[in-house]
Image: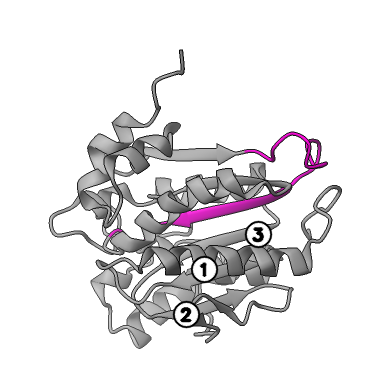
């Protein structure tokens, strides 16, 4: 008999907050606890989709890390990451995918949902970019006028959620990071490769460099390309055809840069 689908614990927590995700889709995603916890003690769930047998990359596949809901009030970001798990299973590509659909469960589960985590920190300003101790507080003070939604924290990697993602960058060593956000409706990119011009209806519009951001830290300073997807709405999902179109365009762009996944190593 087939095993019962994993993931009911994650679905019990998140399903009501995930636009257009059905219970069946949620359970079929088979999210499991990573062992890490949020600031409020909520499990950080993940799902690995290894390279399928016979693709020639069993020993050294391309590694891609996909993270959603770094900002908890961007509900579509979590939903898209979760729905892409099924497409990764069907892709048949020599790729090892690691999905973290809800990096900020405290923010997503808050009522109303919040950009920041359970301790009021913007996780996407909490990564250890060079000069963070000076630049991040100064940017928050002068450029955001101390906007509480963009508080970078008291120190880089002060938060368990950013620590967890940072640890995945070190242990999983992704060749590519895809960070899903909303609601600006553009495509952003940081890193050493030529960026994708579009994913679906999202066109490239590089929005700048921010102290402590994942794109700045991963793409600029670690040499791990970071594709940042900004969906048009935080609450309303794109149509199913668009969900699939963005995925196909991502695969196409990946194929241009990594035509042969085995043996490819990320830049130091």
Residue 73 in the image: above or below residue 261: below
Q: Within 10 angstroms of label 1, few (less than 14), some, or many (20 or more) residues?
A: some
* Mark 2 to mark 1 CA distance (whole Å): 8 Å
Which quadrant holds the C terminus?
Answer: bottom right
The percent coordinates of residue 227 (x first, y second) are 57, 69
Q: Is residue 125 visible?
A: no
Q: Is the residue under label 3 in contact with that under label 2 (CB below 8 Å)?
A: no
| Residue occupied by mark 2 | 201
Residue at image x 51%, y 78%? 187
Left/right of residue 174 with respect to residue 82 in the rendered view: right
Among the 4 quarters of the image, the one containing residue 190: bottom right
First in sequence: mark 2 vs mark 3: 3
Q: Within 10 angstroms of label 2, few (less than 14), some, or many (20 or more) residues?
A: some
Label 2 or label 3, whichever lies nearer to me, is 2
Q: What's the magenta bit mostly, secondary-structure-wise?
A: loop
Residue at image x 43%, y 34%? 30
Magenta-drawn segment: 50-72
| Residue occupied by mark 3 | 176
The percent coordinates of residue 257 (x first, y second) are 77, 67
Q: Secondary structure at mark 2?
A: loop
* Mark 1 to mark 3 CA distance (whole Å): 16 Å
Residue 9 in the image: above or below residue 190: above
Q: How is the image coloured?
A: one colour
First in sequence: mark 1 vs mark 3: 3
Q: Secondary structure at mark 1?
A: helix
Residue 131 or residue 202, whichever sits in front = 202
| Residue occupied by mark 1 | 246
Q: Secondary structure at mark 3?
A: strand
Residue 231 in the image: above or below residue 107: below
């Amino acid at each position: 008999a087939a095993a019962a689908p994993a993931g009911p614990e994650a679905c019990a927590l998140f399903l009501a907050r995930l636009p257009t995700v059905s219970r069946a889709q949620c359970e079929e995603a088979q999210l499991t606890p990573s062992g890490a916890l949020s600031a409020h003690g909520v499990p950080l769930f993940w799902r690995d989709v290894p390279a399928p047998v016979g693709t020639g990359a069993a020993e050294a596949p391309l590694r891609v890390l996909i993270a959603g809901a770094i900002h908890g009030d961007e509900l579509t970001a979590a939903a898209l990451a979760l729905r892409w798990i099924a497409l990764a299973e069907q892709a048949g590509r020599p790729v090892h995918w690691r999905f973290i659909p809800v990096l900020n469960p405290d923010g997503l589960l808050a009522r109303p949902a919040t950009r920041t985590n359970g301790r009021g920190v913007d996780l996407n300003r909490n990564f250890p970019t060079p000069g963070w101790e000076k630049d991040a507080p100064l940017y928050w003070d002068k450029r955001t006028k101390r906007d509480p939604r963009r508080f970078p924290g008291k120190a880089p990697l002060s938060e368990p959620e950013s620590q967890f993602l940072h640890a995945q960058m070190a242990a999983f060593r992704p060749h590519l990071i895809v960070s899903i956000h909303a609601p600006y409706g553009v495509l952003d990119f940081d890193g050493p490769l030529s960026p994708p011009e579009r994913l679906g209806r999202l066109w490239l519009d590089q929005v700048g460099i921010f102290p402590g951001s994942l794109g700045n830290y991963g793409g600029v300073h670690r040499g791990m390309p970071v594709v940042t997807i900004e969906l048009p709405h935080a609450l309303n999902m794109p149509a199913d055809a668009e969900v699939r179109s963005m995925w196909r365009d991502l695969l196409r762009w990946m194929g241009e840069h990594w035509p042969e996944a085995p043996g490819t190593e990320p830049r130091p």
